Image (cartoon, rainbow, N blue to C red):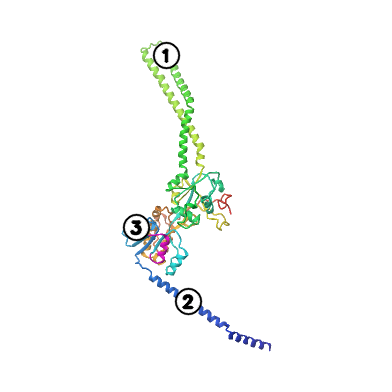
């Protein structure tokens, strides 16, 4: 009986709930299905709208492409000019404008390819997608890299600095004047860089100071930072060529003063050598005269004998003077050499720092020594273990070296595979090592270039016959177990 009452109660409850407008299980299922259908319909409408907007965008033939670059000498513009000079059947238009305008034109379909050194923003990506464009991962065509260098074979007392440490060294108001302030050796600190407009320094601004490209200003840097045009001047500064030249002038002055101080001593030595030479010749002449006397040999030409004897004495004196000259030169040169050696270490000791591109460092690795860079930047990652990165083409292409930015080509995925786009990018990849030199960029490795080729369905060239079946390995110097300790947070300090 209790069971029957329970069933009747449950049935009554269900009827009451239905009568009050509360959905039962079947109603819930029908509601979910309706909501799903509405979402699907909304998605179809959005897709149709995007396709309509895409179809309304400007269209171009497969053999034509519009290109946007930020400068008259940009790599992609020079590549277009080189292709056109070869009477290429492709047609290209190039417009020079800021990256912001380039992305606006890209999302509006007015251009096909955009060279830029900054990633696309979320808003820009959303605008492109709203127009039915698929702007995915960019094509990397090179790297802008900043290498922090010191003089080779000069021990600064450390090999690695964090990104946060570099900011402490370079920032406005920095009180660091000696490398020991950052836990390195007791050497005075000085630095020289390229102008802020250079890609090298914009990389420092972006990575070290977290400044957008173009917004890194002189007011962000310490006032005693020297800025020059031309990396060769930075190389000379870091190598201390001016200090070596100054030392050479000091050595020349020391040579003169040393010779003057020793003048009386040298003169006394000269007189002694000359007198000894004269006495030896006169003594020899005396022995010859006595021998003739014993032989009772008459001198037929006494005057001639006297002249010859006088000439012998003069020749001996000249020889003694030459010996004295040689001894004086040797003594002065030895003293000057000792003076130079004693002062050379002090001359090369100053810890001068320079910031150059990777190609310049690579070409002058015999005189420049790079600091390794730890990516810790003091913005939430300081708990990570030290991870010093040595600059090399391998670490730069792998994008593991912190002070490197890619140079990108953005485009809609469908337009990137057009004949015109692939022809241009294939040329950039084939001539990459030559093209990047003008902009002091780090070129793509063979593996990186081939990945781009495969992505865009560009033929991958066969390796040279001598390289078939071989593997090239890049060796990176061993990393230190930990950076030197420091009293300044973020500079070579363990977390």
Q: Main secondary structure of the magenta part?
A: helix
In the image as oriented, which residue stretches furthest toward the front?
Answer: 219
Inter-mark Cα distance, 2 to 3: 48 Å
Q: Which mark is residue 40?
A: 2
Quick one: quadrant of the C terminus?
A: bottom right
Mark 3 lies on residue: 81
Q: Which residues are magenta?
A: 96-110
Of the two numbered discs 1 and 2 on the same chain, state the one appearing first in sequence. 2
Inter-mark Cα distance, 3 to 1: 96 Å
Does residue 331 show up? no
* Looking at the image, residue 223 lies above or below residue 99: above
Name the side, left or right, on which 220 lies relative to 5: left
**Residue 292 in magenta stretch:** no
Does residue 28 show up? yes
Q: Nearer the viewer, mark 1 or mark 2?
A: 2
User: Neighbour class for label 2 at 10 Å: few (<14), some, many (≥20)?
Assistant: few
Residue 241 in the image: x percent, y percent?
Answer: 45, 42
* Looking at the image, residue 15 lies above or below residue 158: below
Q: Nearer the viewer, mark 3 or mark 1?
A: 3
* Looking at the image, residue 5 lies above or below residue 411: below
Q: Secondary structure beneath disc 2?
A: helix
Inter-mark Cα distance, 1 to 2: 134 Å
Mark 1 lies on residue: 289
């Amino acid at each position: 009986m209790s069971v029957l009452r329970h069933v009747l109660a449950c049935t009554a409850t269900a009827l009451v709930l239905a009568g009050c407008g509360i959905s039962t299980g079947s109603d819930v299922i029908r509601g979910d299905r309706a909501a799903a259908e509405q979402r699907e319909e909304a998605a179809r409408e959005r897709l149709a709208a995007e396709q309509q907007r895409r179809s309304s965008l400007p269209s171009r033939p497969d053999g034509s492409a519009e290109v946007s670059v930020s400068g008259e000498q940009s790599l992609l513009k020079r590549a277009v000019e080189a292709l056109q000079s070869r009477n290429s059947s492709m047609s290209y238009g190039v417009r020079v404008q800021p990256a912001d305008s380039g992305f606006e034109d890209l999302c509006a379909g007015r251009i096909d390819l955009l060279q830029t050194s900054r990633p696309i923003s979320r808003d820009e990506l959303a605008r492109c997608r709203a127009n039915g464009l698929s702007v995915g991962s960019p094509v990397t065509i090179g790297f802008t890299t900043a290498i922090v260098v010191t003089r080779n074979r000069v021990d600064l007392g450390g090999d690695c600095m964090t990104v946060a440490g570099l900011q402490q060294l370079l920032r406005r108001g920095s009180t660091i004047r000696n490398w020991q302030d950052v836990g390195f050796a007791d050497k005075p600190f000085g630095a020289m860089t390229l102008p802020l407009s250079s890609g090298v320094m914009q990389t420092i601004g972006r990575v070290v100071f977290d400044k957008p490209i173009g917004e890194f200003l002189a007011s962000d840097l310490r006032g005693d930072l020297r800025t020059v045009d031309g990396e060769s001047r930075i190389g000379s500064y870091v190598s201390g060529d001016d200090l070596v030249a100054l030392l050479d002038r000091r050595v020349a002055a020391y040579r003169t003063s040393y010779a003057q101080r020793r003048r009386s001593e040298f003169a006394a030595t000269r007189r002694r050598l000359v007198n000894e030479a004269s006495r030896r010749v006169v003594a020899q002449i005396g022995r010859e005269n006595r021998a003739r006397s014993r032989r009772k040999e008459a001198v037929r030409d006494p005057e001639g004998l006297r002249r010859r004897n006088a000439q012998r004495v003069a020749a001996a004196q000249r020889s003694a003077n030459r010996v004295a000259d040689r001894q004086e030169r040797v003594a002065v040169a030895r003293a000057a050499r000792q003076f130079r050696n004693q002062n050379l270490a002090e001359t090369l000791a100053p810890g001068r720092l320079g910031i150059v591109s990777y190609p310049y460092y690579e070409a002058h690795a015999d005189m420049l020594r790079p600091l390794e860079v730890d990516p810790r930047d003091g913005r939430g990652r300081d708990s990570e273990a030290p991870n010093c990165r040595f600059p090399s083409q391998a670490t730069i292409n792998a994008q593991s070296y912190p002070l490197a930015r890619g140079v990108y080509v953005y485009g809609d995925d469908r337009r990137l595979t057009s004949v015109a786009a692939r022809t241009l990018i294939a040329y950039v990849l084939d001539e990459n090592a030559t093209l990047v030199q003008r902009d002091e960029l780090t070129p793509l490795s063979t593996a990186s270039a081939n990945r781009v080729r495969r992505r865009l369905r560009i033929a991958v060239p066969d390796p040279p016959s001598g390289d078939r079946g071989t593997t090239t390995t890049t060796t990176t110097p061993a990393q230190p177990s930990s950076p030197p300790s420091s009293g300044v947070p973020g500079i070579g300090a363990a977390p």
